[in-house]
Image (cartoon, rainbow, N blue to C red):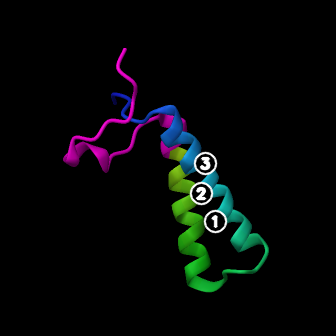
């Protein structure tokens, strides 16, 4: 897998994942919607760690800086 995510993209995804987790933990969001947000947060963290987003491939997106 070739990296297709830049630093800013990874930071934004981690922040969104933390917000989703906080909403669930505080009870602001619960039930099935809460589980969906937790799942999305987990996906955001995983893609940030791998620096690869599979959804970028079909659209030809790449937020990495040119080296």
Figure quadrant of the C terminus:
top left
How far apart are the alpha carbons under marks 3 and 2? 5 Å
Residue at 38% across / 35% down in the picture?
Answer: 63
**Res 25 quadrant in image:** bottom right
Q: Which SS does the magenta portion mostly show?
A: loop
Q: Which residue is mark 3?
A: 14
| Residue at x 46% of width, y 35% of height | 51
Q: Which residue is mark 2?
A: 16
Q: Residues within 10 Å of mark 3 (few under 14, many from 20)?
A: many
Residue lying at 63% horizontally and 85% vertically, measured from the top left = 31
* Residue corresponding to mark 1: 20
**From the viewer's perspective, is residue 26 above or below residue 39?**
below
Q: CA distance from mark 1 to mark 3?
A: 10 Å
- The x and y percentages for residue 20 are 63, 65
Circles 3, 2 touching at the beta carbon (< 8 Å): yes
Residue 28: give its label: none
Q: Quadrant of the N terminus?
A: top left
Q: Which residues are magenta?
A: 47-67
Nearer to me, 59 or 34: 59
């Amino acid at each position: 897998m070739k990296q297709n995510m830049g630093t800013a993209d990874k930071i934004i995804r981690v922040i969104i994942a933390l917000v989703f987790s906080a909403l669930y933990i505080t009870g602001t969001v619960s039930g099935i919607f809460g589980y969906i947000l937790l799942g999305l947060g987990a996906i955001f963290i995983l893609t940030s760690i791998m620096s690869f987003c599979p959804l970028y491939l079909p659209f030809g997106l790449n937020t990495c800086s040119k080296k």
